[in-house]
């Protein structure tokens, strides 16, 4: 399961690399793709390539074909992740939390692995580096930024889930209400970190 997530991440990274290469190639000739959805990217690039030199247009179309293949395989790989989460009772339980999808659930499931190695649930957040650093010296004792130790992929997945819960989710729940109160007081970034920590716990 861990390797499945790693392979999916690799395909996503390569897909973004190809898209950025297409953008850069067209931009060199004054043709800007701009901010556009992934679904309309190919149509936009095709339209712009008609304004370019014949060689550049052919080059861009070949890159677009490579992107199309990566996109198809990415979708198939994402489907494997979804299937893996649906047969896992722990992942299904995690996905009952608003904002938590298959990627977050599977990343957290594989990151924790054996839950019995944690004596308290609070140590899970510390294990993934979502707790603040402590600075203590004599009379000085204050909290700094989060430690960012542990599994980066799990931490990122929790942040994404927390952001989705605060920004996109419209379903009323105690966790979202608590996060929105923090957001009004301290801003979106601190609220996202706090909700991510709460999700881990």
Image (cartoon, helix red, strand yellow):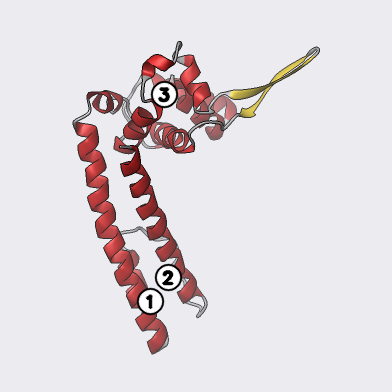
Q: Which secondary structure, mark 3?
A: helix
Q: Which mark is residue 199?
A: 3
- Residue 5 at what x, y percent from top left? 34, 42
Viewer-nearest residue: 153 or 34: 153
Residue at (44%, 15%) from the top-left corner?
A: 118
Which residue corresponds to the image point at 35% horizontal and 54% vertical from the top-left? 11
**103 relative to 198 in the view: left or right:** left
Q: Residue at x 30, y 25 (%)?
A: 94
Residue 175 in sight in this render: yes
Q: Earlier in the sequence, mark 1 or mark 3?
A: 1
Q: Which residue is mark 1?
A: 60
Is residue 94 or residue 77 the one in the foreground?
77
Mark 2 surroundings within 10 Å by alpha-carbon count, few (fewer than 14), some (14 through 19), many (20 or more): many
Instruction: Decide: is 21 above or below 99.
Output: below
**Residue at image location 44% in from the left, 38% down from the top:** 153
Residue 52 percent coordinates (x, y): 42, 84
């Amino acid at each position: 399961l861990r390797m499945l997530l790693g392979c999916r991440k690799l395909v996503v990274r390569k897909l973004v690399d190809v898209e950025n290469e297409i953008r850069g190639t067209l931009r060199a000739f004054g043709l800007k793709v701009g901010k556009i959805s992934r679904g309309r990217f190919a149509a936009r690039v095709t339209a712009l390539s008609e304004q370019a030199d014949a060689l550049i247009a052919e080059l861009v179309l070949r890159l677009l074909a490579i992107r199309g293949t990566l996109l198809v395989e990415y979708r198939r790989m994402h489907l494997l992740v979804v299937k893996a989460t649906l047969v896992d009772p722990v992942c299904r339980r995690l996905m009952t939390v608003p904002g938590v999808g298959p990627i977050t659930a599977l990343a957290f499931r594989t990151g924790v692995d054996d839950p019995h190695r944690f004596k308290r649930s609070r140590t899970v957040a510390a294990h993934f580096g979502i707790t603040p650093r402590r600075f203590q010296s004599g009379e000085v004792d204050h909290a700094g930024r989060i430690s960012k130790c542990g599994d980066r992929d799990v931490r990122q997945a929790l942040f994404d889930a927390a952001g989705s819960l605060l920004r996109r989710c419209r379903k009323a729940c105690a966790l979202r209400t608590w996060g929105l109160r923090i957001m009004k007081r301290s801003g979106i970034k601190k609220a996202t970190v706090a909700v991510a920590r709460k999700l881990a716990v």
